[in-house]
Amino acid sequence: MILTVSGIIAILMPVLACILQIVFAGFSLGCIPSVGAAVFAVLAFWRKGPTLAIVSVLLAFVQICTLNIVLTVIIAVIGAVASIFLMLGCEKWREAHPELTDPKAATKHMIIGFILPCAISLLVMYAYPVVRTFFMSFFDMPNITAPVSEWTFAGLGKYVKIFSSQSFIRSLQNMLMIWFVGGIITLALALLFAVILTSGIRFKKFFRAAIYMPNVISAVALATMWIQYIFNQQYGMLNSIIKFFNGTPINWLATDMKFWAMLGSFIFGAVGYYMLIFISGIEKIPADLYEAATIDGANKAQQAFKITFPLLKGVTKTNLTFWTINTATFYLWSKMFSPVDTEASVIVPVMYLYDTAFPSKGNMRADAGAAAAVGIVLAIIILAVYLVMNKLIKDDDVEL
Amino acid sequence: MAFGKNEKLPKVHQKINWKKEATLLPGYIIILVWLVFTAAFLLWILAASFSTTPEIMQGQVFKFETGFHPENYAVAWSQQNVARYFGNSLLYSITGCIVTILISAPASYVLSRYKFICNKILKSSLIIAMSVPAVMIVLPIYAITASWRNAPDRLIFTVLMIFFRVPYTTVFLLNFFQTLSKSYEEAAAIDGCSPAGTFWRIMFPLVQPALVTVTIFNFLGIWNEFFMALIFANSQEIAPVGVGLLQIVNSMKYTGQYGALFAAVIIVFLPTFLLYIFLSEKIIAGVTGGGVKG
């Protein structure tokens, strides 16, 4: 009895999902779960796998949930009952099929069942979107949600368009400044802190934790603190210090200062992460090297320059790679420093992408193709830097 | 194991070697300047969250001339919608953390311990997926989710956050499953436990420390997510704390309640900060142990 009921549920749910999807929303990309559910239902009957049946019902369930709120509530109840039936059905089914206790078959089922959700997330969240972004960058489309049938081929037109755009060039310049100037300051500070913290000072763990702290708290909160307090013209920390020394207060958030204010506050938050990676690199260097150097009369600074830095090639590469990814996807701080209208002084490529895809002003037309082209350019930059880094800095020079 | 701490001999109570400390003095000074700066501005924000707007404007937050003003928190919590943002963020983070583990841990287990056709391909795709920037995927995902017109938006954003964390979580756990001894599985098989049962009953609890670490990172990641939230959870109803705080800052021009603004900042800042106070050792070990390969 239970076997029959759960079997019927496993067939009916995907069918129901398909019908409801077409009735409510028509045939579109949103059909993916229901199509998937149908595929799994077929697989379930072919392979006689209860796990597959459960997956199919879950997918059907997700599909129906996306359609209508009232339906969702009704379906939630049905779904709960259905899954209980299916579970019971599975137990019975196992008892009825002793050959399944054959470890090989059971292992196979487990591998499929365990890997599927992960593989689905990879396909839905990464593989398909990356491919579609790539194609979007060569097409012109009326809006971001337009179906493929409404796309018209534009060749390299979108790339030409973004590279002839004043704001995009400005955003690339800003990104380069952040990468170069910010990179030197951040990595130098991180290395300095790492060397100090590993030089045998007290309270090392506390200092390390305190310097890393800004990485853990919400960056929006951190940025708000900097903008509303430290850089504030009236009561801000920096201007209070300047006034204390009888200087003239500076408007830190004026157009010409804004970029540096943003970079400074960003660096403050970023240093801790790179410091941790440097520390882990330094701690891998064998202590006897330093002992030998001390016996030979080298002081701390000499030890740092002659032993520590040359042996940190590998972690420096890691840090540079992370820094590059971090600057290429830089967005939050720019947004916080120009929250309403994008300002040229702090614009970065991701911001340009966001404004192109989702324009906030009514008179601007969204250009999803150009936005996709920006994404592709950023991905190429990251990839190129990664490859160059791997060529230039080989970390197998020294075995640690 | 990436997590093993360097075992050190138990410290005998050492006398302070003043000569040695003196050579380290420049180091102490540099670190202390940085920390004093951090502490000073955090304390100022905390004090400002208990002050009135005129007091903040005059730069006199530490005097508390008119006493403490905890009502700033009440204003931020109810009038400025922080309660809703906070609830949304909690919902996204908690659901996200649990479901991510339920998807990633089994996948990571079979990937690290069983040989099958797509094993290598899947592993490398996971590592590639980890480094795919969000800008490469948001446009198509926006197109997909927009076609689900009637979908509850919170569900969509939660699912996105889960999928966003799956590659990192799976890769993070690979090493930990690899180090477990084969004899657990053999013993369980002899006792008649099914392979899947072996995983849930024996292997899953064994990697618990790693699960805790990766869950902390997932929680921080989802709590602090901003770019995706701005696109997929932008409306007042469903915004998480990051986007919510941005909306509060933007409305500051009209409301002018600086005390409440700083109270909102503290409310957003506090959960992850408290988490960090209790778990900083674990978080720091996780950054260098799990995030960096090699």
Image (tube, rainbow, N blue to C red):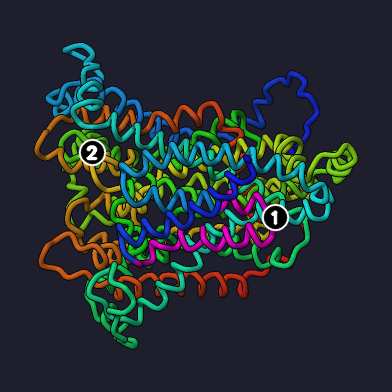
**Magenta run includes residue A250:** no
Q: Which residue is mark 2?
A: A228
Residue A358 occupies quadrant = bottom left
Tag 2: amino acid: Gln
| Disc 1 and disc 2 in contact, CB within 8 angstroms | no
Question: In the displayed structure, would residue B182 be above or below residue A16?
Answer: above
Q: Which residue is mark 1?
A: A307
Q: Is residue B3 left or right of residue B129?
A: right
Q: Position of residue A13 (x, y in %)?
A: 48, 51
Residue A387 can be seen in this image:
yes
Residue bounds of the magenta highlight: A27-55
Residue at (28, 74) in percent of width and height: A169
Q: Position of residue A155 (x, y in %)?
A: 33, 88
Task: For mark 2, name the chain.
Answer: A
Q: Position of residue B236 (x, y in %)?
A: 23, 41
Question: In the displayed structure, would residue A300 be above or below residue A400?
Answer: above
